[in-house]
Every structure is written in C-alpha cells, then in structure tokens.
Image (cartoon, helix red, strand yellow):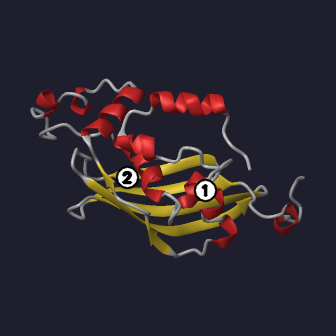
C-alpha cells in the first residue's frame, strides 16, 4: 500500500490547528478502496455527503491564516458589521476544504482519489458562509468521458446551509487515474 512519507506526515501535523483538521484523513491512500471509481459511476446518480460541516470560528480563522487573506470582512467582526454583509463571513473559496471534509468516503468521494488531476472547476456563489452555519452537499454524477486517453468525471453539487439556502453550485471535474488493470481501459488509437 502506498503511504505518504513520515516527513510529510509530520509537516501536516505541525500545521493542524482546528478540531476538523485533526480529524481529517489527509492521507487519501488510506481509504482509497472505498472511493467511487470512474468505471462504476452512473450519470444521473444522486447522493449526499458523508457528514455535515458545522462552521466554527476556528475553521474560518485557520483558512484566513493559511491563505494569508487580507480582506477585513473575513478577519474583523467589528469592521465587517459595518459592511453590506452585516458581519464577518468566510472567504468564498473556504468552500473547497469544506467539500473535501464533507465527502469523506461517501457520495462524491472520488474527489479524494490519489493521483487525480484537476483540469478546472466552476463554482457559483449565492449566500455567504458564516460562523454557525451547518453546510451539507447534494451531488449528482453529471458527466464522464474519455479524452486523449484520459478519464474525466464531473459532478454537479449544491451546497446548502441549515436554512436550506443555496450557498454554492459546483461543477467539479477531475481526471482520474485508472483503478483497474490497464488492459480493461485500453482505448483504440490512444497513445501508450
């Protein structure tokens, strides 16, 4: 079984600050046999994330720190109260680690596939994320195709909060590595 190096593991542990970071299985090789596989995904299939994400102050603080965010609406509650948002909000891309955390080994777990390549994402934001929000995801297998001998998979996801308000729509695409024998996936005319 492939594992991350001890040096990488120690470095990750050094920077883990929040409860969720410490609980998160950052070594995607550990549960890889539980992840959805390209060849098994049926377009139109819907599912929900493995768990919900309760947004805590420490989660936003850690994200703002690691991204070196400078915008005061993400950092300063008193200043943020004077803005159109009426209080502190999380940076929009805070949604990215949230999705990985919620997916776990359930529906949408293919995003954790070791060796996957990210050719691009499309995210539309609707409601800001605030401390105390409870985020959940409903996903649908949207598209899968072969292109230049590579396996692409796109899921459409809706992220909502505890009031069932739409927080974001996400079309996530990855190029997934082969998970079965190479012979089963040989594409006529593809380069070797």
Q: Is residue 18 above or below residue 41?
A: above
Which of the two marks, 1 or 2, is nearer to us in this view? Answer: 1
Residue 124: assigned label: 2
Please tell me in which quadrant of the rendered image residue 87 appears: top left
Left/right placement of residue 177 relative to residue 107 reads right
Q: Where in the figure is residue 21, as x and y percent of width and height?
A: 42, 41
Q: Which residue is mark 1?
A: 31
Front residue (pair 4, 180) = 4
The alpha-carbon separation of the residues under discs 1 and 2 comes to 30 Å
- Residue 146 lies, in percent from the top left, at 72, 62
Residue drawn at point x = 69 percent, y = 69 percent: 39
**Mark found first going from the N terminus, 1 or 2:** 1
Secondary structure category for the residue under label 1: loop
Q: State the image coordinates of residue 134 (x, y, percent, origin top left).
A: 27, 56
Could you say whether the residue bearing mark 2 is in a helix, strand or loop? strand
Foreground of the two, 4 or 126? 4
- The quarter of the picture where residue 109 lies is bottom right
- Residue 185's place in the image compared with 12, above or below, is below
Q: In front here: 187 or 135?
A: 135
Q: Are marks 1 and 2 in contact (CB under 8 Å)?
A: no
């Amino acid at each position: 079984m492939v594992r991350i190096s001890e040096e990488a593991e120690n470095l990750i542990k050094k920077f883990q600050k929040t409860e969720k970071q410490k609980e998160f299985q950052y070594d995607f090789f550990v549960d890889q046999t539980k992840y959805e596989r390209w060849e098994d995904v049926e377009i139109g299939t819907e599912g929900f994330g493995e768990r919900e994400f309760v947004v805590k102050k420490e989660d936003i603080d850690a994200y703002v720190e690691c991204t070196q965010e400078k915008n005061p609406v993400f950092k300063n509650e008193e200043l943020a109260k004077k803005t159109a948002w009426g209080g502190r909000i999380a940076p929009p891309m805070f949604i990215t680690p949230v999705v990985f955390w919620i997916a776990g080994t359930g529906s949408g777990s293919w995003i954790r596939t070791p060796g996957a390549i990210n050719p691009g994402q499309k995210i539309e934001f609707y409601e800001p994320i605030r401390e105390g929000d409870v985020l959940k995801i409903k996903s649908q297998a949207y598209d899968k195709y072969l292109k230049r001998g590579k396996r692409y998979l796109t899921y459409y996801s809706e992220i909502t909060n505890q009031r069932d308000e739409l927080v974001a729509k996400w079309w996530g695409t990855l190029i997934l590595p082969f998970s079965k024998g190479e012979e089963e996936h040989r594409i006529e005319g593809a380069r070797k």
